[in-house]
Image (cartoon, coloured by chain):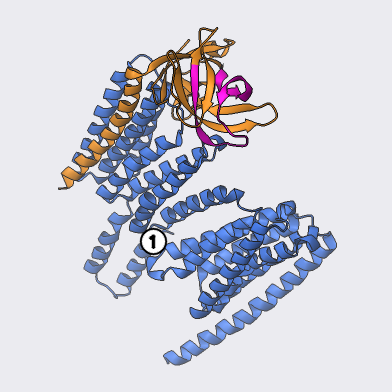
Amino acid sequence: MNKVKWLAAEAKKWKDEGIIDEDQHERIMSRYAGGARTPVLPILAAVLLGLGVLTFIASNWQGLLPGTKLTTIIVSLAAAYAAGEWGRRKGHEGWGVALTIVGIAIYGAGIFLIGQIYQVSAHPVYAFYLWFAGAVPLAWHYRSRLIAWVCLLILTVSALYGMEDRYHDGMERVFFYLLFAAGLAPLVWRFRGAWLTALSGSLLLVSAAYDLDDVGDGMVYPVLFLACYLAGQWLPTSLAPIPTVLRNLGYLGSVLLTVFLIFEPYDIPAHNVTDTWLAAGLALLAGWSAMLSYRARQPENATDLIPFLAHLLVYWLSPLLLKNAAVVLILGLFAFAIGMIVGGERKRQVDRINLGALFFGVSCVVGYVNFAWDFLDKSLFFLLGGALMLVISGLLERQRRKWVNDARRESR
Amino acid sequence: MRRFRLLFIVVFQIALLLSIVGKYQYIAASGMSVTLKTAPVDPRDLFSGDYVRLHYEISEINKQHVQQDIADGLDDVPVYVVLEKKTHPWFEAVGVYQQPPRLREGQALLRGTLLYQDEYTGTLHIDYGLNRFYLQENTGREWEQKPFLLVDLRVTESGDAIIERLR
């Protein structure tokens, strides 16, 4: 159920129970009804029109002279922005944004058209950077979350283009991070949408993981994911949802990396100077994170560090562990998921419980499918794990009832 | 104020487009004509459409056959390739340098990036950023079937170039 539907159901109950009157009920509903509307049809129209312009340019139709095409692009670009502005002034907010998005698509098509006219093939990523640089001021001008999404989309496509090896030179990557920092990050900061933040953060994290591939043989990834988690832990909660999103990205990165290494244990780095330094850095970051949890009086959050500590352990013991490294990582994953569920139960944090349950499910599937264990060991592990979970849930339930009874007694 | 801000953004976008046009128009108007030999392939780009991928004869230059100041093991640096018309109707590489050299009559300069060196054969692999010739869609087949193509370039004295024609 979305928030507005929930509010409508609750507000009706408040009215029926006499907590609020009819007038107050109407005022509450009118306040939130408008905010939930997304101009779906105009946006779909803008997407189709934008794609139409881009594919028309991509067809490189020779029926029009290049100069005529360029003039058409510039005139239609100005016309789309003017129509968007006019629509907004007349109160058609949805159509205004949609036409502005069409204008942004025409601007991008103009860049590709010039590339075609002059047969430009060096650094195609810069075309997207120029497109992005032109779109960002419009997101600020209109304070439009939708245009911010368009900016994210353009930068994401630039990152995908940049991942092709032959376009992957140093300055292109520097410009990518500069544009992210100066263009996208301020928009994320301004709008603070959970999904906008999550996808922008994912873009940055995946790009960084890709670019740091050459540093050592693999310890750089847990360092990167722990740094992301630590940033989420360190930022104040008043910046919501940024800290939560960063922490979740840290969890997700560490779990995906662990799952990958469970199935590909030969990718666990062997001892080398760079990875040893990175492992030392990982230990330091883990210590810093544990200290922040302790200071924030949330010691149960220390269990979030288990996958990172498992990576450290596997790295230090890699010559001894061999194929058992996968077993250590699976155990780490289970301990992390259980720690998250138990911590969530104790603090009554539903999101944490749900995330822990998801990771627990992932751990079960990975544990079952992985062939590093014999079936007998595996069955024993699952039986003991299941029994342990039953005991823990029983203890937590008893604790919960005690709290509820205490609270009732206090309220009397 | 809001209206001026929007006007400024639109003018900024148009100026950006026209400045790119200006740069390439300058090369087209002032550059020297150079023809190169190349072999075609025919892929497609999602945003720019169909194109012929061009692989130039001068993309691979044997160090022993030209004058050069490229140290062994050097890679990923800008290089300047001196071109001259000799026995063929197209230009050939006669020198590769890290700094733009003084040119003789009839020579042209092309700037590229030294991707890597094949130490065994002594071959320099150079990218000139002139690897695509965009075509109207579904017209690439005829180009692809030719054994080799000639590309007419416009090249400035500083080594910047644009493709003018494919034949």
Q: Which residues are magenta?
A: B54-83
Q: Secondary structure at mark 1?
A: helix
- Residue B39 is inside the magenta segment: no
Residue A372 seen in render: yes
Give the quarter of the image for residue A48. top left
Given the image, on which type of amino acid does mark 1 rest? Lys
Q: Is residue A85 above or below residue A282?
A: above
* Colour of chain A in the image: blue
- Where residue A344 sits: x, y (%)? 55, 73
Neighbours of disc 1 within 10 Å: few (<14), some (14-19), many (20+): few
Give the quarter of the image for residue A15. bottom left
State the residue lying farthest toward the left: B1
- Residue B68 is inside the magenta segment: yes
- Nearest the viewer among A64 and A275 is A275
Q: Which residue is mark 1?
A: A3
* Colour of chain B in the image: orange
Q: Is residue A274 left or right of residue A84?
A: right
- Nearest the viewer among B41 and B107 is B107
Residue A90 seen in render: no
Q: Is residue A347 above or below residue B111?
A: below
- Where residue A379 sits: x, y (%)? 80, 64
- Nearest the viewer among A70 and A194 is A70
Q: Is residue B136 left or right of residue B7?
A: right
Q: Residue at left 36%, top 18%?
A: B31
Q: Residue at left 74%, top 52%?
A: A266
Chain of the residue on which disc 1 is drawn: A
- Where residue B15 sits: x, y (%)? 26, 33
Number of disc labels: 1
